[in-house]
Image: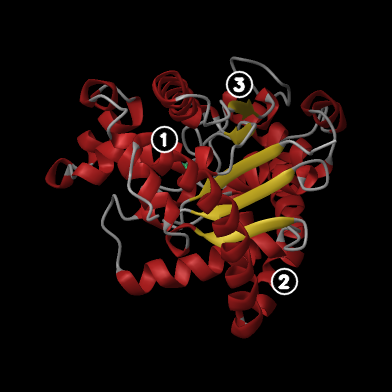
Amino acid sequence: MDKKVMYSAVQPSGNLTIGNYLGAIRNWVAMQDRFTCYYAIADMHAITVRQEPADLRRRTLELAALYLACGLDPQKCALYVQSNVPAHAELAWVLNTFTYVGEMERMTQFKDKSARHPENINMGLMDYPVLMAADILLYQADYVPVGVDQRQHVEITRDIAIRFNHRCGETFRVPEAYILKEGAKIMSLQDPLHKMSKSDENPNASVYLSDDRDTILRKFRRAVTDSFNRVAVSEEQPGVTNLLNIYAAFRGCTAAEAACAFEGRGYGDLKSAVGETVADALAPVQAEQRRLLADKAYLSGVLKEGAERAAYTARKTLSKVYRKIGFYRGE
Ligand code: TRP
């Protein structure tokens, strides 16, 4: 039986947080045996917001090294850089003609980002979901593991696929979002009602995968809690609940079990235990990432092979699309 296809990507912009790790990359590793997986580094999406060229290039490699350090196996999945596979841009152009301006103007992320970058509301920012649809549809993906913030983009991908299939005949598999478990949602350490984000301006709000041990311990020590003085999972204690969720996610237990373990102990104890747990868990990943970044030849080999594998599949879909819409392909 053919394996189902899984597609996802992360942008090489900003520093990844433990939320990205727990919510995305760590789960991808668990899925690489059961599915045919394509995991991209979405540099073409990243440039919809201004990037320093040297930083973009460096972060692209850092993200590739991180994918590998987290346990993604280049034998099992295609790991590649989006811009290395030209079919993404090519299919996006065609899909643009199957997407309405009004639909794009209504996308939540477009509205948010336009508000945050009023000086640079470029066409790419608005077209972002169409490029994402091209990513996903090129590989005939069944599932797209994403966080809730990307659900709307997967929905519009479905709409575009259905619309194209309806007009031009069955061409694309209609993908489904694969939304990860609720418990995995990691909140800001400074404002636990909001998601931990790699673009947060307050560096104490997020724990980055690149943070060293001291920084991690300090950020957890400063985490916002409350004045209940009771370690419990509860809606009125979002800060403490978040710490318990983080602890549980790294320890492989439930937040309720973690709360039991800390019963009767103070917030200081909880914060240092969570900090130690996170620092211990990240240390080997960081060491492996550093080792890989020192081996540029290996990294570039992995990305080249990943891009070749991706391009092979992508080309097949793109040819089909070009034929269906009537592009001349030679005799
Ligand atoms: N937009 C996604 C994010 O910022 C990244 C992304 C690009 C993606 N292309 C994708 C995710 C295709 C899933 C599928 O998180």
Report, in whole angstroms, how far the alpha carbon at label 1 lies from the one at label 2.
Answer: 46 Å
- Numbered label attached to residue 105: none
Mark toward the start of the polypeptide (1 vs 3): 3
Determine the secondary structure under disc 3: loop
Image vertical order of residue 114 relative to residue 305, above or below: above
Q: Quadrant of residue 304?
A: bottom right
- Numbered label attached to residue 288: 2
**Which residue is farthest top?**
235
Determine the secondary structure under disc 2: helix
Residue named by callout 3? 237
Q: Quadrant of residue 245?
A: top right
Q: Amino acid at mark 1?
A: Lys
The residue located at (53%, 25%) in the rendering is: 170
Can the viewer see residue 194? no
Q: Residues within 10 Å of mark 1 (few under 14, many from 20)?
A: some
Determine the secondary structure under disc 1: helix
Q: Quadrant of residue 213?
A: bottom right
Residue named by callout 1? 324
Q: Quadrant of the N terminus?
A: top right
